[in-house]
Image (spheres, rainbow, N blue to C red):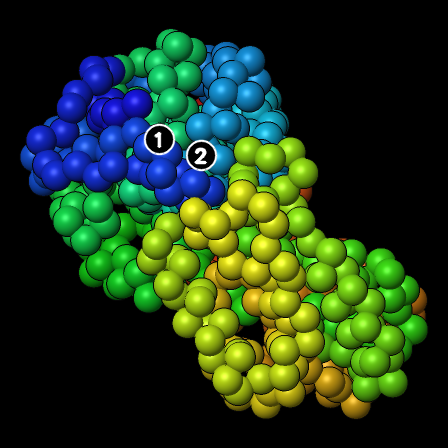
Amino acid sequence: MESRNWIGGEWLSPSGEDMVVRNPSALQEEVGVVRFSTKDDITQAGEAARLAQAGWGALTPAARGACLFRAAGLLEASLTEVAELASQEMGKPITEMRGEVMRGVHLLRYYAAEGVRSIGTVIPSNESGVLQYTKRVPLGVTAVITPWNFPVAIPLWKIAPALLCGNTVIWKPAENASLTAVRIAELFEAAQLPAGVLNLVIGQGHAIGDVLLAHKELDAVSFTGSTATGLGIAEQCARRNLKYQTEMGGKNAAIVLKDADVAQAVAAIVSGAFRSAGQKCTATSRVIVERSVYEAFTEALCKATDSIQVAPALDPGAYLGPVASAGQYEKVMSYVATARREADILAEGGAAAGTDHGYYVRPLVAAGLDSSHPLIREEIFGPVIGVLQAEDFDDAIRLCNETVYGLSASLFTRDLRLAHRFLDEAEAGMVRVNQETAGVEYQAPFGGLKQSSSHTREQGQAALDFYSAVKTCAINYG
């Protein structure tokens, strides 16, 4: 398979450099070739998006929703094919990837249904004979910049509400999720999305990112990725007064109190930390355990970690597959090396058969670290967790909040009073009790506090607020 751009309803081969995509589960396997775009491709995509916006925005929300509904059906029919391609491209285990594709189907149907719901409110006027109301209107042309770790769900939870609100989209996916992006764009084409409404531009961020953000046709930007890149995007958008949202990093904590159901906590923490090889911004990276239950909890956690099945992504039994790329492998293994030198290694899962020629990182549990240590402070984005001890609930909350990030946090307890205190006091945009830190349902707002987010929200009704402007209307009919 070779990547192509989809611009103005036409499939075009970029003229830039190319990159061979190898299966991170088995590096000898070539998945396809990604061809990178140049500045001219961005210009062409911007012009196509601007040209299509007036016609797309003039359609009723119901008509726009109908396109999303057709795309949902096509994606569901292609579930196995899309999931296998994505697993081969970026290494997520096939059982997880199938679930992600189905989440994409639900997202498309959710926003399709919004096409027949309210887009404003009537506001009483102080004058008689005056009708005053608000309505949502499109922003215009939106740039959607997406990461590789959720190659289906994250693009769709941005693109679907953007399109539903009447915007046109320029989509730049991550380099090692580009083949999957092409397949998704093909499904939108099959769903009869009008030419130029969605424009896919494959490219390297350092080569075309600034060009995209500087494009004169642009009205809004939605980005998911690293904090450093997100802050740079925010600065550029603020300079141009573009509407923007950035979803960035996390260093998410799970607190285990002395009255917690240890088995429940271990299962949720292992899932939150090690599913997707820890490559989620919401992944559990810190575990804070009340001292009196520390020994029992860590014993159970280590036993569960030791039993994790590491296997190639297409193996249905794989709990943990490879990390996505050589760069990702090198980064995570540098933290593993630090842990081996400076921490107490409580557990390190074993490698399974068939994992000799891929980017596999064994799940690791480290302890004996101060809360200021880089393994506790920095986002690793891999299957590595650090365990800290807390004296009591107040100490645990202090440790939980001792981070520049504020995306997700969870608490395990049977005490309803402390559960509500946690929901109030934890400095994170998503707080959960007796659930893992990773994941939030597609109909719920997604986003963080502090350096994790630009303080807008994705998914649910919140996405419609971002991808539209509010116009206040009044007419004197007296």
- Report the Cα–Cα distance between label 2 and label 1: 7 Å
Task: Look at the image and tell me whether residue 245 can be seen.
Answer: no
Q: Is residue 273 above or below residue 97?
A: below
Badge number at residue 50: none
Task: Please name the residue that numbered disc 2 is placed on.
Answer: 88
Crowding around mark 1 (Cα neighbors within 10 Å: few <14, some 14 to 19, many 20+) is some
Residue 344 position, x and y percent, is 63, 83
**Quick one: 185 or 361, which is closer to the camera?**
361
The percent position of residue 378, horizontal first and vertical second, equals: 47, 74
Residue occupying the point 39% across, 57% down: 328
Q: Nearer the viewer, residue 211 or 166?
A: 211
Give left or right: position of 175 versus 78: left
Does label 2 or label 1 sit earlier along the sequence? 1
Q: Amino acid at mark 2?
A: Gln
Residues at circles 2 and 1 in contact by the CB criterion of under 8 Å? yes
- 48 with respect to 222 (left or right): left
Kindly identify which numbered label has been placed on residue 31.
Answer: 1
Specify the amino acid type for callout 1: Val
Location of residue 354 with respect to 82 vertically, above or below: below
Q: Position of residue 240 (x, y in %)?
A: 20, 55
